[in-house]
Image (tube, rainbow, N blue to C red):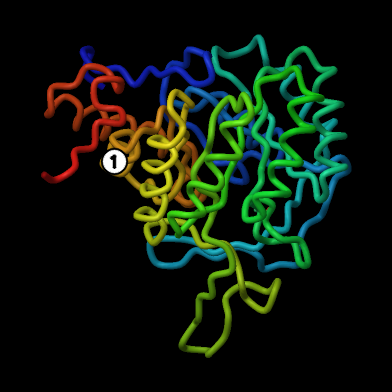
Amino acid sequence: MSSNQTLKTTLAGFHLGSCLMNASGVHCTDENELSGLLNANVGALVTKSCTLESRTGNPLPRYANIPNGSINSMGLPNHGLAYYLEFIEKSQYLHNKIAILSIAGLSKKENLELLKNADKADSIKLIELNLSCPNIPGKPQTGYDFEASEKLLAEAFEISTKSVGVKLPPYFDMVHFESMATVLKKFPVAYVCCVNSIGNALWINVENESVVIKPKNGFGGLGGMYIKPTALANVRMFYSLLDGVDIVGCGGIQNGQDAFEHILCGASMVQIGTTLWQEGPACFDRISNELSTIMQQKGYATIDEFKGKLKSMN
Ligand code: SIN
């Protein structure tokens, strides 16, 4: 990285050394993976979305690499809340990075219980409430139900004294962007992460005429290059609709240019999923260097100089 360029950012009031981090679900399920992120070139890390008790998740194979992307139906395999609370407690003084706890209760009651328990842990500074897991058979994505989202957030912000951000599913309709923004404006959300995978996609192996993952007859969340235009649209829309709320961009970031585009649309931070899965934590060095080079070529010393400044055509 050139000495003039810095990837420093601020998220929910926390000053972070880099605008890059992992996406929840990737390289963050067990202590080994999480420690790898603590040592990686990231400004923050987020845990695997957890439930109160540990879960084994959906049957294998439940993740497949596809050309320039991925499809998954993990089903929230995780070690349970206590495991992640303990990891964050142990690691909080070790590295100058914030560790975000991601939670994904399977019901409103479980989400509120997760928040209640997390509230007791001093080491928890920031929580990502996942409203968008598409992979639990029989459970809809909360973020597509605006009334249920509002009810959950109303109780969540009653209970929690922590900073709480939300991870949203991708939206595709202007009315839906506005409906969710109207809900979010009622609460002090710490940040909004756009987007989770595009739910219930289908990838086919033509050679054997089969789906490529086992759960849900092959239906799973799509990640990687295919979802970047949708992710950028969601970042841009929520950046425009939610004045002053930090946006975290997630979806299709394979290189520095992809990260640059997310920031141009308004992201303060970018999360990397599929690429991290495929390359491991070394991807953060590569993407940091690529982003810095683009900034240098364009004469930007900080990300704030171009964040949100996407131009419209007159
Ligand atoms: C999963 O565990 O199924 C993925 C989680 C998510 O997409 O939120």
**Residue in view at x 52 percent, y 40 percent:** 181
Looking at the image, which residue is at 66% across and 65% down? Answer: 62
Asked whether 285 or 179 is in front, the reply is: 179
Pick the front one: 76 or 96: 76
Residue 190 image-quadrant placement = top right
Q: Is residue 97 left or right of residue 302?
A: right
* Vertical arrangement, residue 240 with respect to residue 157, above or below: below
Q: Tell which of 314 and 13 is nearer to you.
A: 314
Name the residue at 57% across, 29% down: 45
SS for tag 1? Answer: helix
- Image: 59 above or below 19: below
Whole-percent x, y for residue 101 in the image: 69, 30
Q: Amino acid at mark 1?
A: Glu
Q: Locate the C terminus and report the quarter of the image it occupies.
A: top left
Image coords of residue 280 (percent x, y): 49, 43
Decide if residue 106 is on the left or right side of residue 200: right
Quadrant in which the N terminus is drawn: top left
Q: Is mark 1 within 8 Å of ligand 1?
A: no
Residue linked to disc 1 = 261
Q: Is residue 218 above or below residue 308?
A: below
Q: Quadrant of residue 85?
A: top right
Q: Residue at x 68, y 35 (%)?
A: 102
Q: In the rendering, at what x and y percent does residue 167 appear?
A: 59, 41
| Location of residue 269 by image quarter | top left
